[in-house]
Image (cartoon, helix red, strand yellow):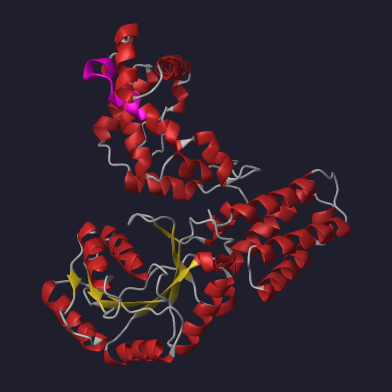
Amino acid sequence: MAFESLTEKLQNVFKGLRSKGRLSEADVKTALKEVKMALLEADVNFRVVKQFTRSVEERAVGADVMNGLNPAQTVIKIVNEELTALMGSETTELTMQPGQATTVIMMCGLQGSGKTTTSAKIAGKLKQKGKKSLLVACDVYRPAAIEQLKVNGEKMETPVFSIEDCKDPVKIAKEAIDHAKQTGCNVVILDTAGRLQIDEEMMDELVRIKEAVSVHQTLLVVDAMTGQEAVNVAETFNDKIGVDGIVLSKMDGDARGGAALSVKAVTGKPILYVGMGEKLSDLEQFYPDRMASRILGMGDVLTLIEKAQEQIDISEETERDMMGRMKKGKFDFNDYLESMKQMRKMGGLSSILSMMPGMGMGLKNSDIEAAVDEKKLSRTEAIVLSMTKAERKNPKLLNPSRKHRIAKGAGVDISEVNRLVKQFEQTQKMMKQMPGMFGGKRGRFRMPF
């Protein structure tokens, strides 16, 4: 994730605070100097850093904190609250027109920011809320833009409106809104053209679109990996055309993450969504408090649960059956394959672990990935897929000759097959001894065994 380096540095600062029984004013000031450096290195706007550290110091340097039972924990709590406030305190939703009125959303941003993909992702999000969107191809300059929007629209089962050989985005926008009303679409998403850099021509075009049609929400997509430049872009777009909300794309990259901590404070505009991957489902609602927890290495269990509820598509009856067999230690390799399938839908085990509380405490994403080793998981899956249906259902059938055949089919050494079978047997025993680990409540997240 984008904050990996910042999280690691902040964890080291907090570790130093926790090692002290009592805190002096000098201890807090020294710690805040380190926090300040960590934020600046993460490419957070220097004015924002200055105000942030001042606010934390004003709250942290006081008799109540210094003489409290757990001063270090109190300072960390203050940092968490101020980080949350910095990013907007409250979650901001897209504002929709009341009733069946058509809501027009204009997407804008520089070329390469992920605007076209984000347009389709937002259409997918709104579909989950019962909205019918129309994606509109207003980028008439980039040759692949219209085709890319059509492909993504098809994946999201969302119609795409375009006018062949038309080079006037204002005309396209007008006709798209008429088409949306005729076809019962209550959301119109205008995917406008971007440029490699901000120029007057681009801004004039966006202004003309806003003058010609009633745009209810103007969303700016900025690439989080560009750091401080993303904040400058946001500030300019807001000054020139007016922005209602911001979407940070590519937050799953190895960027320093400063944009997320600066953009709200500098522009005053809320972050609505963050793009956490290339898949069309990898768009998350932005929750300032949850993002602050992630940055501080405290995990993000609520997002993890929501992700599980959205992505896991096991029927209630199948889930009850699986949980019942797990309680009795009678699950089989078919259950393993189902768990792998559901886990992949949630972004893989490393993505899941990064949101678990405690995993950020001194563990970088690279450490998690090394521990998880997704390639090893794929080899394990290949072993299971090389088994017959009878062998998956009854692992006791796996004698030496069958194991040799499975190893050959999966392209692995026999020792890997033996290791998997042994681990599987141990897991069955462990689950028999700990039935309280499992509950039958719908939507509860289950770790794959």
Magenta stretch secondary structure, dominant: helix
Of 417 and 320, nearer the camera is 417
Residue interval drawn in magenta: 381-392
Q: Which residue is drawn at 59% across and 52% down?
A: 4
Residue 113 position within the rendered picture, expressed as x and y whole percent measured from the top left: 42, 70
User: Disc count in the image?
Assistant: 0
Would residue 32 be found to the left or right of residue 111 on screen? right
Considering the image in quadrants, where does the C terminus appear?
A: top left
What is the quadrant of residue 413 in the picture? top left
Query: Can you say whether 278 is above or below 405 in the image?
Result: below
Q: Which residue is drawn at 27% across and 70% down?
A: 144
What is the quadrant of residue 163 in the picture? bottom left
Residue 82 position within the rendered picture, expressed as x and y whole percent measured from the top left: 65, 64
Q: Does the magenta stretch include residue 347?
A: no
Query: Can you say whether 399 is above or below 428 in the image?
Result: above
Q: Which residue is drawn at 29% across and 86% down?
A: 214
Would residue 116 be found to the left or right of residue 261 on screen? left
Q: Can residue 402 be seen in this view?
A: yes
Residue 98 position within the rendered picture, expressed as x and y whole percent measured from the top left: 28, 75
Of 169 and 63, nearer the camera is 169
Query: Can you say whether 77 is above or below 270 in the image?
Result: above
Residue 35 position within the rendered picture, expressed as x and y whole percent measured from the top left: 73, 60
Of 383 and 351, nearer the camera is 383
Query: Which residue is outermost to the left?
Result: 182
Of 371 and 361, nearer the camera is 371
Would residue 218 be found to the left or right of residue 300 on screen? left
Q: Is residue 385 magenta?
A: yes
Q: Can residue 447 be seen in this view?
A: no
